Image (cartoon, rainbow, N blue to C red):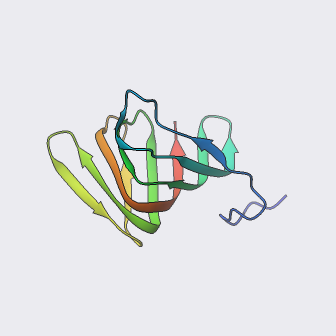
Amino acid sequence: MSHAIPVTIDGVEPEISRPSTEKVIAGDPVHRTWNVEEQDGGLYAGVWESAPGEWRVSYDEWEFCQILEGHSVLTEEGGNARDLRPGDALVIRPGFRGTWRVLETTRKTYVMRL
């Protein structure tokens, strides 16, 4: 078993999901998630993708992500909006509340700790 694994989706079956209907503001944001690492204690890493749409988000977990493709806007309650494009990276801390709007299908890598 290697202690260094590539973050690639080759051969990984994606999980398909949608935000709950009460969170959706616009569109039909279908998500595909390829988890390439899951560890006891709530650590996850992989690739996430969403079709266009907008929904309310509420983070209880810590996440690092980097945008690979597409265009999204992450807006924190109170109006602080971040335009996200390929190459952009950010840390989302527990307690973040706001909206995620996907303008062009967006794909990101992520590491999440619950």
Q: Residue furthest left?
A: 78
In the rendered image of this protein, does residue 76 appear above or below residue 95?
Answer: below
Q: Left or right: where does residue 57 sit relative to residue 81?
A: right
The image shows residue 81 at horizontal and vertical percentages of 21, 53
Query: Depth check: 93 or 70 in front?
Result: 70
The image shows residue 60 at horizontal and vertical percentages of 41, 32
The image shows residue 87 at horizontal and vertical percentages of 41, 72
Query: Depth check: 81 or 4 in front?
Result: 81
In the image, what residue occupies the spot 50% across and 60% down?
108
Which quadrant holds residue 41?
top right
Query: Depth check: 27 or 5 in front?
Result: 27
In the rendered image of this protein, does residue 57 appear above or below residue 46?
Answer: above
Q: Residue furthest top?
A: 22
Quarter containing the N terminus: bottom right
Q: Residue furthest bottom?
A: 87
The image shows residue 93 at horizontal and vertical percentages of 36, 43
In the rendered image of this protein, does residue 60 appear above or below residue 52?
Answer: above
In the image, what residue occupies the spot 45% across and 61% down?
106
In the image, what residue occupies the spot 15% across and 46% down?
79
Q: Left or right: where does residue 31 sit relative to residue 9?
A: left
